[in-house]
Image (cartoon, rainbow, N blue to C red):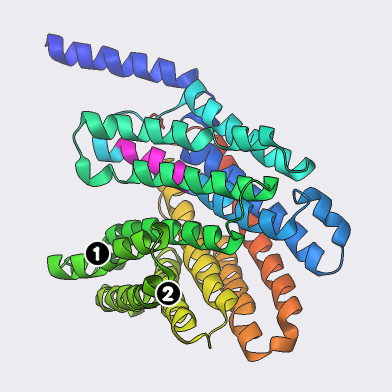
Amino acid sequence: MFKVGDETMMQILDSEKEQKILPLFRLAFRPFFLAASMLSAVSMLLWGGFWAGNTALSGYMYSNPIWWHSHEMLFGFTGAIIIGFLLTAVQNWTGNPGVRGWKLAVIFAFWLIARLGMFTSTPHVLWMVIDLMWMPLAAGFLAQPIIMRRQWNNLFFAPLIVLMTVLNALFHLIALGGSDIPLRAVSFATVMVISVIVLVVGGRVIPFFTWRGTHTEQITRIKGLEYGALVPSWLLLLNVLLPLPEQVSAFTLPALLAVASIMHLIRFVRWRTLSTIRVPLLWLLHFAYLAMIVGMLLLAEHYSTGRMNYSIALHIVTVGGIGCMILAMIARVSLGHTGRALQIKPIIVVAFVALVLATLSRTLLIALQPTMTIQGYIISAGLWALAFAIFSVVYCPILTQPRIDGRPG
């Protein structure tokens, strides 16, 4: 009897404590999903406007549009989504409450101040220092409960975040003139880190979501096939990060890209994609995973023969793979973690379609009509901005209000 009473009292106290926290800061997915989506919509509008001929907009791009676009989409946007997702997921993995309240607000504040600084200023060490704070803080809060619960299979996410911080520092040093490492090399390494995260998380959740969402037979995971897909992915990451001799990397990089993509394709064909056609929350996940595979295979072709355009292959991964995976995941996670049914509004389907069209505009249109390259940039940027603007408007009340079931989070 006393134990039940104690548990009830703890639930009351936890509820009272929760009510004192602004809903936006009750779990990490709330501020980061919303603000990162808004950031990406605004950033893409600026990017499209710049390519449309308004070069004065470079004043809002850290005075270096190419650097700013790459950095803000990889770290400001994608990095924020990853942090929001992981700091939320760790609560489910460990059973320990996720970071919330003022601690979460501090992490978010560093992220936000850095973003505003790079919108309004020129390269300066101050913005580098501020921008290098939020990811290590997040990695610490992520690792702590994982270590306490000894869930070693999830611990690798923390060093990956630290690795992204190192790559972020290299980005800033390039902007400040303190490094002569090519921007393309650092951005490609960052894309590969993010790709591994997407492939690992996608491989865990897509089969499960598909099974549950289509009410079909459970999709089993074949251990040998899982290792066959993930081992070359990790080796690919090592190949990109380690200072291998150019003669060695010229062979191993395309080989690992090809092997990884083929193994992920074999893994993917077991996931019953056709059964998801009537479920937007599922088909966009499948489209994103397939885009990752196709993009990596085309990157292998680029590094092997040079015939494939690097930018097109890369953007199949970044827009079609990473971007679509993000939109599908945040649309789903935001509903589930606020106590809502996994039912999206028709306007969100419009956002999904817009992002798929953004992928095709940035890749297929340019590949088929090279003379329309600039138009492809502009159309793709506008469609991306539309997709994430729709998400921001529809999900703002969901992410800024308490859970509808009254539970913490």
The outermost residue toward the bottom is 368
Q: Amino acid at mark 2?
A: Met
Q: Secondary structure at mark 1?
A: helix
Q: Amino acid at mark 1?
A: Val
Residue holding disc 1: 231
Write down the region rendered in magenta: 82-91
Apparent side of residue 103 relative to residue 363 in the rendered image (left or right): left
Residue toward you, 281 or 167 = 167
- Quarter containing the C terminus: top left
Residue toward you, 343 or 184 = 184
Residue 138 position in % (x across, y down): 44, 34
Q: Is residue 282 above or below residue 306?
A: above
Magenta stretch, overall SS? helix
* Residue 341 visible to the viewer: yes
Residue toward you, 300 or 153 = 300
- Quarter containing the N terminus: top left
**Residue under the image location 14 percent in, 9 percent down:** 2
Residue 303 position in % (x across, y down): 46, 79
Residue holding disc 2: 296
Q: Residues within 10 Å of mark 1 (few under 14, many from 20)?
A: some
Q: Earlier in the sequence, mark 1 or mark 2?
A: 1
Q: Secondary structure at mark 2?
A: helix
The picture quadrant where one finds residue 161 is top left
Residue 322 position in % (x across, y down): 48, 62
Apparent side of residue 293 relative to residue 348 in the rendered image (left or right): left
Q: Is residue 364 shown in magenta?
A: no
**Residue under the image location 31 percent in, 29 percent down:** 144
Q: Is residue 213 above or below residue 361?
A: above
